[in-house]
Amino acid sequence: MSRLIVVSNRVNPPSGKGEESVGGLAMALAAALREYSGIWFGWSGKTTPEFTGQLNMQRVEGVTVATVDLEEGDYQEYYNGYANKTLWPLFHYRVDLTAYDRSFGEGYDRVNKRFAETLRPLIEPDDIIWVHDYHLIPMARELRRLGVTNRIGFFLHIPWPAHQLVVTLPRHRPLVEAMFHYDVIGFQTEENLQAFEGYVLNEVGGEKTEDGRLRAFGQITEAGAFPIGIDAEDFARITKSPRAMRVYDRMAAHSVFRKMVVGVDRLDYSKGLEERLLGFERFLHDHEEARREVMLLQIAPLSRDEVEAYQDIRHRLDGLIGRINGAYAEMDFTPIRYLNRSYRRDELAGVYRAAKAALVTPLRDGMNLVAKEYVASQNPEDPGVLILSRFAGAARQMKEALIINPNSPEEISDALSRALAMDEAERKRRWEDLMDNVTRQDVTAWRDDFVAALKGDPTVQAANTETPDEPAVTT
Ligand code: ADP
Ligand code: G6P
């Protein structure tokens, strides 16, 4: 069996600070690699004054984790810079937050080259290589320059945006050209795939081959939609673990959690946290009877906190939560509980299960795994209700959620009141459908479909698991 080499900026474990990394990519890859005795290569989470190229190798649960430190300047230009001040905001439709500094692009290319050079000696002829996310788009180009002829695939965990947004990047063409060094490119949704194809066909004169692949820049690649999932089986298991049960029991016994609504997100402007809070405020305003009863528990660990846009959103949330609690709290009841920290997965599972509804309201999101984790944690006899933004990739699959437009406080408020009043039969019917989806399209299916495509298995097509219509607005 050929080895799988997974390459991503963030590696989990270790985060470098001795903590578990928070974020969908790390969660999914940890699960995807569990059955492979492969290699996971990426950044150690540490910086040094000069780049050394020194590999740190350890064995973690059957996986060889190989990491490298970043030079401080590279960390600023590549990670804080091009990855998180340029590509992340732009690909999440925030042109207003996008920085186009040339030095960021140079740092980005330099780190991709350095990562490729560090990884090169570990690659054996039969290995297949799977590169992940927006930090590492040029990896295949750099590996090819070093003579690597192995099959190399790429999966983008975040949205691929509309053509008109991509061309705002001063160097959009070389970025997309770099993608044509991959044998297979995976996107989260059909919509993202179509946007990519639209760029290739209309901007650079590319074309579709007879067998449905894409030809441009003198190269051919296969692009497909491979919606990512969670390890649903493992989640169902940890939901019943002693620690999850303890968290659940404590909450269930306490009256303030009786009508709890939960939100769990990295503190990121793409997650629609302000809009969610405004929706919750509208709900409290419109529903006097709910004021001493319904509580929003928002868990939001800090993320990328050296980037100004993240500092700004944090300040705005602090102010907004203070204002809403100031207006609606009682001596013995606070409507919003807000926690900037991470939790163990089993504890999160207990919290999800105790919540009557989850608010997952991103303004843009590649997929959103929290939506799937919430569903997987529910009690089948008394499940809670998922309220989901139409702008999350997950909304393309999870049509039995209450689908809302997060820009509308009224839609959020109406969905909350509908969720909290929903009878058991409807909750069960919706949950069963959602759970079926979460179980069938889990992380193993995602990995196996992608790896089969990468191995060139002619019987496997990229999974088209979506129905073609727009998600229905059900509130
Ligand atoms: P993103 O990848 O943009 O962060 P996702 O919803 O796809 O968004 O994935 C987030 C992942 O991070 C989920 O697996 C979720 O459980 C995890 N996570 C988010 N917040 C926390 C937290 N406070 N503690 C532990 N894990 C968290
Ligand atoms: C999202 C991105 C990942 C990233 C994660 C956490 O899931 O798609 O690539 O790892 O957020 O962000 P961080 O900057 O901490 O790695």
Image (tube, helix red, strand yellow):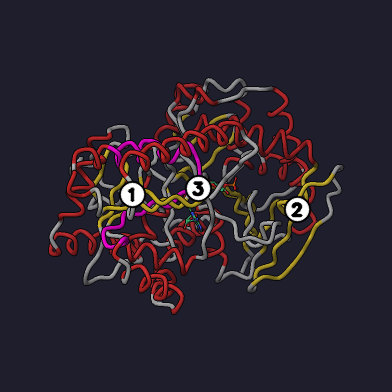
Height in image: 63 above or below 176? Answer: below
Height in image: 155 above or below 60? Answer: above
Dot 3 lies on which element? Answer: loop
Give, as a three-letter code, the residue at label 3. Arg
On the image, the x and y values in percent for residue 346 come to 46, 69
Q: CA distance from mark 1 to mark 3?
A: 21 Å
Give, as a three-letter code, the residue at label 2. Leu
Q: Which residue is mark 1?
A: 335
Residue at coordinates 48% horizontally, 49% vertically from top-left?
300
Residue at coordinates 28% horizontally, 55% vertically from top-left?
357
Mark 2 or 1: in front is 1
Give, as a three-letter code, the residue at label 1. Pro
Q: Looking at the image, which residue sits at the far front?
A: 331
Q: Which residue is mark 3?
A: 266
Q: Give the crowd class for mark 2: few <14, some 14-19, many >=20 residues within 10 Å.
A: many
Q: Give the crowd class for mark 1: few <14, some 14-19, many >=20 residues within 10 Å.
A: many
Which quarter of the rendered picture does the C terminus lie within?
top left
Q: Nearer the viewer, residue 339 or 80?
A: 339
Mark 1 or mark 3: name the one nearer the start of the chain: 3
- The magenta stretch is 256-281
Mark 3 or 2: in front is 3
Label 1 close to label 3 by CB (< 8 Å)? no
Q: CA distance from mark 3 to mark 2?
A: 29 Å
Mark 3 or mark 2: name the one nearer the start of the chain: 2
* Residue 468, visible in the rendered structure: no
Residue at coordinates 70% horizontally, 63% vertically from top-left?
65
Q: Quadrant of residue 408?
A: top left
Q: Nearer the viewer, residue 383 or 284?
A: 284
Which quarter of the rendered picture does the N terminus lie within?
bottom right
